[in-house]
């Protein structure tokens, strides 16, 4: 369900994509080779134009359908085929074809069905075609798909092109088979204006050239779609010199095996037993340092040390002369590694294994040109890098194409597939003016004031030792927070896959269980490493907010999980600015706050889920369309609005928040959190009897909820047991605050402001 939010998020960059596409496509050139010839054009004015075509079935000239209202067009009915043999050998060339799609769809668009297709044919019968293909996993009613096959098994090798069928009308399709670079597919709208470049991987096409072109009619059972073809243009080229071969299969890590529990350990330092600060000459003199597969080489040997969490610092100033893996720019990025986002950008903007010196606390990054929405080419930096005291260098390793990873608590990511991040790993190198104590945390990578916190000052007495019946793998949660969470964007578009969660719901699940583990009776030495890594996450997130980051708004499940580490860290380090983050940064967005509010719910509860897009914390205005909705009856709910919000209430937010709420209550942090409705809402989720509500949802809104989406539980045994054992323990607040009337002016005012704005 959260994919709806991802799709909505892409609208942010639609205008930028459109403006770039025309520039990029206009640069495409076809290298004809020594056998190049003038273009041959077929306009289908009369039956004579079909003289050299091999026709099967209902293929006729339609004198009323010519593009632009002139002449005729080729009408292709269901089950028909038109083949034009061009030469005896498979060689290069370019084919342009105009297709009229009237938007018709079969009664069931989810049953496997080859609709209209058009494309290139190799001598052995292998085909590369574009068309309208239907299947349970394809949106044939929405967009176009390319297929590479033997001309019989149309669903063998598919490429969802990301090009919409709507609006009905003419589409121009171009197949460019270059002598050096292989085949490429382009698309233009009915005015001939290039659109977003189709998402096509030419290494998987399997063609060595082409000798014919063909047009296939709808091959499905029952009533099929008729379509029209016009202005076919063919330019033949010479022999193909090389075809991009599929890259060697990358290791495909699918499953939990990516997440090997960490054996990291750290000493427990206290104010009574603090470590000594080393002298400069005590630090190692090194030519380079490495972490998580990334190496930084200095122009001359430099003194280096490590923070309490293992991250490196170098005493500066210093110059970084080389980074491994080597950052790649422009044409240095192998063509075989380009994804559809790369291809939408000018060549000069392409980058792999990028780095950022002093990343801004903003949704702007330059690590990899495959980043959606947040990629800012003006931030691209090149070696050498001169670092001075207070600087932070964030370096990355890019995801290669073909590598499939399973992020923490998520499904799978693969470069160029859906909205996956193209960044695999990141590490931070900090430049300090002098040696720091061994118990120093790394300063936040976005904080130019280089605030230094010491683990000896952690208020460990705030952490209870609540008994736990069963625990998740502690080493696994150490690993989840061990590497720096350097994502400053949203939707996970730029989050390093091996470092951090990719989805806000899973941020909340990870940090909630981390915090809850810190409240158990784990042995101090086991708890300390988890504590150090968790606090480092809080320092980094807090550093973003301090440096002007807008925060993480309520947007489906995306905005959750960031506030908890900040508040926890502030309390444990005695930093009121972080502990009371709402008070000191009142305009910062946090999903848990924006999506919960006091008010009358249709179920009788007095606290509500404030919707998929919730209430803007900075303005106090309910966001239009998918804001607060539980104050209305299910019988009035609309698809894509209230129903969408209810789906996100159940799939991607509420159950993920429960561990957060319990951990905060266990350390008595309700006042610091400063949003009481969140705690009462989590109590409502766990204690409300929704038997009748589920019936009404099904009857009045046609929403039948699966068992896993019911109230009264979370997805983790550990969290459920801790809640059952400790939420009602002595000293805990009452559990029925969600039933009591509260000041609901915040919700009412938010709705009134939205209504006034709509007028």
Image: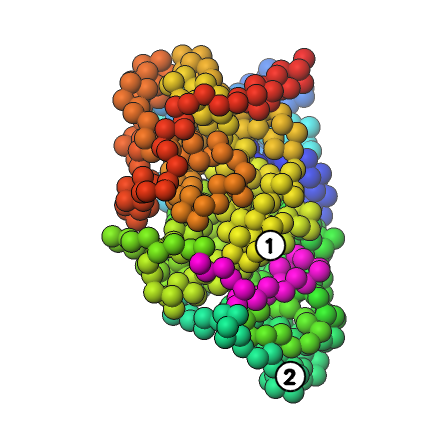
Query: Residue at label 1?
Result: 575
Image point (53%, 52%), residue name: 571
Q: Is residue 93 above or below residue 695?
A: below
Q: Position of residue 564 (x, y in %)?
A: 50, 47
Give the crowd class for mark 1: few <14, some 14-19, many >=20 residues within 10 Å.
some
Q: Nearer the viewer, residue 422 or 260?
A: 260
| Of the two numbered discs 2 and 1 in the rendering, the one whose residue sits closer to the viewer | 1
Does residue 619 appear in this view?
Answer: yes
Image point (31%, 33%), residue name: 712
Magenta stretch, residue numbers:
441-461
Residue 446 colored in magenta in the image: yes
Q: Position of residue 535 (x, y in %)?
A: 51, 58
Image point (37%, 40%), residue name: 732
Rendered image quadrant of residue 604: top left
Disc 2 and disc 1: Cα gap in Å?
A: 28 Å
Give the crowd class for mark 2: few <14, some 14-19, many >=20 residues within 10 Å.
few
Q: Nearer the viewer, residue 404 or 679?
A: 679
Residue 744 colored in magenta in the image: no
Does residue 417 appear in this view?
Answer: no
Q: Position of residue 171 (x, y in %)?
A: 60, 30
Nearer the N terminus, badge 2 or badge 1?
2
Query: Residue at label 2?
Result: 279
Asked whether, in this view, residue 64 is left or right of residue 720, the answer is: right
Label 2 sits on a secondary structure element that is: loop
Q: Is residue 404 above or below residue 645?
A: below
Image point (37%, 33%), residue name: 734
Asked whether, in this view, residue 458 is left or right of residue 445, the answer is: left
Label 1 sits on a secondary structure element that is: loop
Q: Decide: marks 2, 1 in contact (CB < 8 A)?
A: no
Q: Nearer the viewer, residue 651 or 173?
A: 651
Q: Position of residue 229 (x, y in %)?
A: 56, 28
């Amino acid at each position: 369900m959260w994919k709806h939010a991802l799709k909505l998020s892409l609208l942010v960059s639609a205008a930028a994509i459109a403006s770039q596409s025309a520039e990029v496509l206009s640069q495409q050139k076809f290298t004809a080779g020594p056998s190049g010839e003038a273009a041959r054009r077929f306009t289908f004015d009369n039956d004579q134009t079909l003289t050299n075509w091999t026709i099967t079935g209902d293929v006729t000239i339609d004198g009323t359908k010519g593009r632009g209202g002139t002449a005729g067009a080729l009408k292709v009915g269901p089950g028909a085929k038109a083949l034009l043999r061009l030469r005896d050998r498979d060689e290069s060339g370019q084919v342009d074809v105009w297709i009229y799609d009237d938007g018709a769809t079969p009664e069931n668009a989810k049953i496997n069905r080859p609709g209209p297709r058009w494309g290139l044919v190799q001598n052995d019968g292998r085909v590369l075609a574009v068309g309208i293909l239907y299947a349970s996993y394809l949106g044939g009613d929405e967009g176009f798909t390319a297929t590479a096959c033997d001309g019989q098994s149309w669903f063998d090798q598919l490429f969802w092109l990301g090009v919409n069928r709507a609006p009905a009308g003419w589409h121009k399709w171009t197949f460019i088979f270059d002598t050096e670079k292989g085949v490429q597919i382009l698309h233009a709208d009915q005015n001939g204006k290039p659109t977003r470049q189709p998402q096509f991987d030419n290494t998987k096409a399997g063609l060595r050239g082409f000798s014919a072109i063909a047009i296939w009619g709808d091959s499905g059972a029952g009533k099929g779609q008729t379509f029209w073809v016009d202005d076919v243009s063919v330019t033949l080229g010479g022999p193909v010199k090389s075809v991009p071969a599929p890259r060697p299969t990358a290791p495909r890590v699918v499953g939990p095996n990516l997440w090997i529990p960490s054996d990291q350990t750290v000493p427990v330092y206290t104010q009574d037993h603090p470590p000594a600060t080393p002298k400069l000459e005590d630090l190692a003199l090194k030519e380079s340092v490495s972490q998580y597969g990334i190496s930084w080489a200095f122009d001359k040997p430099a003194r280096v040390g490590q923070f309490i969490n293992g991250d490196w610092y170098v005493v500066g100033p210093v110059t970084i002369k080389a980074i491994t893996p080597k950052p790649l720019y422009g044409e240095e990025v192998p063509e075989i590694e380009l994804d559809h986002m790369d291809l939408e950008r000018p060549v000069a903007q392409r980058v792999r294994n990028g780095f950022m010196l002093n990343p801004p606390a903003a949704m702007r990054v330059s690590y990899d040109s495959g980043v959606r929405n947040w990629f800012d080419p003006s931030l691209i930096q090149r070696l050498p890098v001169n670092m001075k005291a207070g600087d932070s260098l964030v370096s990355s390793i890019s995801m290669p194409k073909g590598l499939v990873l399973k992020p923490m608590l998520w499904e799978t990511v693969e470069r160029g597939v859906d909205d996956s991040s193209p960044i695999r790993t990141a590490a931070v190198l900090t430049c300090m003016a002098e040696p720091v104590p061994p118990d120093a945390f790394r300063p936040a990578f976005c904080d130019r004031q280089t605030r230094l916190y010491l683990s000896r000052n952690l208020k460990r007495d705030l952490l209870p030792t609540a008994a736990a019946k069963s625990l998740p793998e502690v080493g696994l949660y150490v690993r989840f927070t061990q590497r720096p969470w350097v994502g400053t964007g949203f939707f996970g578009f730029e989050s390093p896959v091996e470092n951090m969660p990719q989805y806000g719901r899973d941020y909340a699940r990870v940090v909630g269980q981390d915090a809850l583990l810190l409240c158990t009776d784990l042995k101090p030495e086991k708890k300390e490493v988890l504590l150090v890594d968790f606090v480092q996450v809080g320092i980094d997130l807090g550093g973003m907010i301090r440096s002007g980051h807008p925060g993480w708004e309520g947007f489906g499940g995306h905005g959750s999980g960031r506030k908890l580490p900040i508040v926890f860290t502030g309390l444990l380090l005695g930093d009121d600015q972080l502990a009371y983050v709402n008070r000191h940064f009142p305009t910062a967005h946090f999903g848990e706050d924006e999506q919960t509010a006091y008010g009358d719910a249709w179920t009788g509860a007095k606290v509500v889920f404030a919707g998929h897009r919730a209430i803007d914390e900075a303005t106090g205005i309910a966001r239009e369309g998918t804001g607060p909705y539980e104050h209305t009856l299910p019988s009035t709910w609309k698809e894509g609005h209230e129903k969408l919000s209810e789906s996100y209430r159940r799939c991607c937010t509420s159950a993920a928040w429960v561990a957060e709420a319990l951990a905060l209550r266990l350390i008595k942090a309700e006042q610091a959190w400063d949003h009481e409705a969140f705690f009462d809402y989590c109590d409502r989720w766990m204690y409300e009897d929704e038997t009748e509500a589920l019936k009404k949802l099904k009857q009045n809104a046609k929403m039948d909820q699966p068992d896993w989406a019911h109230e009264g539980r979370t997805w983790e045994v550990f969290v459920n047991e801790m809640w059952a054992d400790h939420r009602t323990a002595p000293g805990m607040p009452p559990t029925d605050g969600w039933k009591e009337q509260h000041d609901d002016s915040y919700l009412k005012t938010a709705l009134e402001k939205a209504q006034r704005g709509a007028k």
